[in-house]
Image: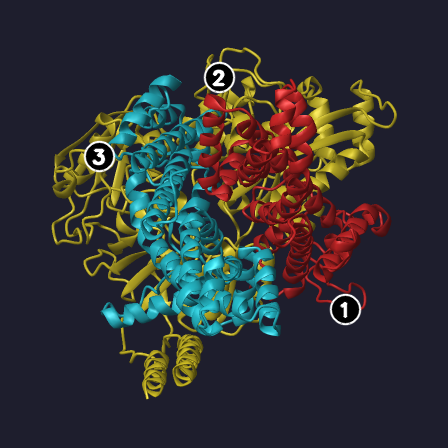
Chain colours: A yellow, B red, C cyan
Amino acid sequence: MRVKACALLAIATTLVLATPPATAAGPVILKVAIVQQIDSLNPFLAVFQSSTEIGRLMYDSLTAYAADDQRVTEGIANRWEPSADKLTWTFTVPDGKKWSDGQPITAQDVAFTYNLMLTNEVARTANGGFVANFSSVTAPDDRTVVIRTKAPQVTMLALDIPVVPKHVWEKVTDLKNYANDQMPVVGSGPFVLTEHVPGQFIKLKANKNYWRGAPKYDELHFVYFQNSDAAVQALAKGEVDLVNRMAPAQFDSLAGKDGVTRNKAQGRRFTELLINPGAQTRTGEPIGNGNPALKDVRVRRAIAQAVDLDALVQRVSLGYAEKGSGLVPPVFGKWHWEPDAQQLHRFDPAAANAALDAAGYPRKDGTRFTLRLIGRAGRAYDEQASEYLKRSMSDVGIVLDVQLVSDNQLNEMTTVATYDLAFSGWATNVDPDFILGLHTCAQRPGPDGKGGTTDAYFCDETYDQLYARQLSEFDEAKRVEIVKQMQARFYDQVPAVVLAYENALEGYRSDHFAHFTTQPAQGGVIMAQNGVWGYYLAEPAARAEQPSRGWYGLGAFAAALGSMVVAIVVATRRRKATAGERE
Amino acid sequence: MSRFLAHRAGVAGAVILVVAALAALLAPLLIPADALDVTRVTDAPWQPPGAGHWLGTDHTGRSVALLVVQGAGTSLFVGLTAAVLAVGIGTLVGILSGHFGGLVAGALLRVTDFFLVLPGLVLAIALSTVLPRGLGTIVLAIGLTSWPTTARMVRAQTLTIEARPFVERARALGGGHGHVIGRHVLPSVVPLVLVNATLAVASSIVAESTLAFLGLGDPTRISWGAMLHQAQLHGAVPQRAWWFLLPPGVAIVVVVLAFTLVGRALEAVVTPKR
Amino acid sequence: MRLIGRLAGAALSLVMVAVLGFFLFRVVPGDPVVSMTRGRPTTAAMQAELRTQFGLDRPLHEQFWNYFTALLRGDLGTSFTFRRPVADVIGERLGPTLLLVGTATVIAVGLGLWLGVLAAWRRDSAFDRATTGVSLTLWAVPTFWLGMLLMMATGEVFPSRGMRDTDTAPDFFSQALDIGHHLVLPSVTLVAVVCAEYVLVMRSSLLEEMHAPYLTTARAKGLRDDLVRRRHAVPNAVLPAITLVFLRFGLVVAGAITTETVFSWPGLGLLFYDALTGPDYFLLQGLLVVTAGAVVVMNLLADLLHGVLDPRVKVV
């Protein structure tokens, strides 16, 4: 009798579990997969790309970059004016913009944010570089911000600093340990942070007070994935709506998938092959143990000539990349530089061989010398590209000793310059100042070997002079010209070979969201923009169907578990019964 | 020997091991020179099993079947050397702590117990994060974290042997430490150590695959674990490329099972039934 | 006396864990701040600021002293990645891991012991051979591989990641159902691997018990085999097996790391993996100290429990 009761109970449980819960017409949600962790939601501390992106959704900056062509456009300020000597900048914050709690956004908020960074070292953790040249920031009235700089600075309209509400943040005493998790978090951007479960998800709600107008859907969820593999699977199943940073093979696997649209965009990153040009500290002390042959620019040029960039793009990136040239990726059109026929290090092993012979490194038993190539273990690009480089170098008589190491070891080896060749790469901004400045002499480490940010150890007088000139050149056409000259100089001196600008590979559920705005309009990205357009302007599909869930899986599992329990109970009871009878 | 042959499962395991070892040793002969060089492979990636490649191709167009053969060498090498290292340390510590009394034994026992308790994989992961990538690191990480079981068993055996009358007699007749350990203790622990080593190889191979899967392996070598790491890295699951996922895993399971079966058979031979 | 000895031993082990945790991650060359900021716009001044924030500019012995005294207060330092106290980061991941490991252990223990008893009972039967064979095979299966296979085989039946969907209704029933749905594959994976060990141990433990002299006595008294086994042998054999569950807690921890990694289950194991890819040394150190500490404590419990339950255990 009891057996039957148990069985009935098990079946009942199974049925309950197998019945999907009624789904009411809920809010329209855009679910975005992120693979990188969130380090902090405090915009003064957030360093990771994923966190800064969410920060932009919560807080506007003084200015913004337009979606279609990335020109500077209205942010918190709608007008700006430099003084004649370019040392004083006046920004106007218009009336009518509000924080998500209804308080007006004023010039006081901007001055508060910038002054916090000027006075508090902790507040400079994430974006300190932007204010290094500031001497004062004041707000003479609620509409006007006045910034004075120590020297003329061309990047005054590229201040990518989230402006925080003074009435909330002036109460924060311990900035270093402030997690910014008083939900909902008061902000000025198109979305308001409402929930954060570390390692799982982040939820934001549309900001109805947003000055550009409320977003066209209700909620934006960032769902954390441990790897892009799982994210791509989830996109295919409709569990998330938007995924980026796919590997080429993953991108290909989504071709022709119903309800999924792919976006192959120009990326903002470049991948490079560092060639240790004889690393030195800022004071000129040699450091590290790079192969002395690489000090010879003829050798470095020969190596550049021996690398088949087209093969790397085709075989390693499966065509989802553009061949490398200058330091600024082609996505930033006007700043990008391409070598002309004369400047080009054309792929030509024979010429490279001849150049190496001429430089005084003849082959002995077929080889000239050995170089160490350092790459990161676990990064698919490094693992594959090193195989190709090994072969290319052996064609010109150079033996490559490939060492794939952990991220940390790679950093260590590049900061103390114990490499000959190494893979590296950088993300670039709309304004090329950072990536150009990275290769000036001043970025090399100090006498104690610490405090450097470069990993290329490039130090060239011509380049440094050009860098100083472009920094105070306010005529953009002329500045573009100088920036291109700098890239040409870098290319000519070859402290590194820019291998490729990899495409940003994204995919979205076009059955849930009909349209996304890319930046720039042609070949642009949806995620990781210099702005929030991709998320903010997303348009839900006319009949946004919520994906139905495969509850039958749980049902089947519950049934299996239930019947197992029944089996055990039955088995035990039967044995007891027989034992009892026999006794 | 004949007693071992009576254990059919053990014999089956031994046969499998011979095949795997042959595959590993003959790999250079079985695999054409450029077949696994990604820069020279011309076949399409992600091919399902078919006429050209009977186990399909991986993300670079290399034959999965050849990769499995090539991977046998690394996996077996790591498994064997790590096991030898672990059992070596274990035997040494076990005999020393069993033979010598007092403080030395107490300290050794304390350390053994400490490592016995620690989650080996966690420690191995920590070690291989810290040390430079390479085969040596993996062997070291696994070997240094899996010796305590052997140490415990060897110690118990040593204590038992030393309590026997003939050892006491040897000692009374003036036999030094070296004599007692070399002539009496060592011979009696050898069978036990052998069994332990066989089982340790099994767990070392699994440990190697786990470390490689987590991206802590030697990236310049092909092992079964490294293949699974690649499969995960390049999206074998969403592509449903079962032919890339199944073979290396099956290879691990079969070889590990074989070592386990041989180990159990040896165990049964060494410790006869009461 | 025995109790004090055990407690002192466990305390010593905990101290050793703490020391190991510090030096293992501190003797390596490498500047964590550089790893942290790699590939991003950073100035040397910002790096120096980060270094001071994490106390990395102090001499090693001072760092150790600070670490050790902080540890005694339950402070595990600050995570590079999350910019928050390691103890907090670990604390919020504890729940999901306990849920997964707890569910899996309960099922694995129940199933493992039951199958082990049945197999020993019918020694050398087809059932015994099959159970032992399957267990040995499962024991040889790498956890992560099994997880990937299950994921591929079940296709769209189960969710591919995480513990719950973000758009599930907030009421308890919907949430529980959603979490249950996500829990199926990870727990099946973990059960399969852990269970195998329990089956084998229970089986051999019961077989050993069945040779014990008192059973012969009982049988001689005329009690039927079945009854003898159930009333005497099974209860006695279960004891060592249960102890083993505690002793092999490290095995479950290891299984959890790979299982959580494959299924993006937001627990300690996944945190471990994330800390590895950093690598976030303070977090790794905290995780090592916490997991190893937990295992030490579990062992102590097993030890004490064993002593209480089984009067035959003597002071060694």
- For badge 3, the amino acid type reads Leu
Q: Secondary structure at mark 1?
A: loop
Label 2: few (<14), some (14–19) or many (≥20) C-alpha neighbours in 10 Å: some
Q: In the rendered image, which residue does mark 3 sit on?
A: A175
Q: Nearer the viewer, residue B188 or C18?
A: B188
Label 1: few (<14), some (14–19) or many (≥20) C-alpha neighbours in 10 Å: few
* C132 left or right, relative to A140: right
Measure the alpha-carbon separation of dots 3 and 2. 30 Å
Q: Are marks 3 and 1 on the same chain?
A: no
Note whether residue B14 is visible.
no
- For badge 1, the amino acid type reads Gly
- Label 1 lies in what chain? B
Label 3: few (<14), some (14–19) or many (≥20) C-alpha neighbours in 10 Å: some
Q: Nearer the viewer, residue A499 or A462?
A: A499
- Determine which of the numbered discs, if any, sits on residue A449 in the image: 2
Measure the alpha-carbon separation of dots 1 and 2. 56 Å
- Compared to residue A228, the image places residue A460 above or below, namely above
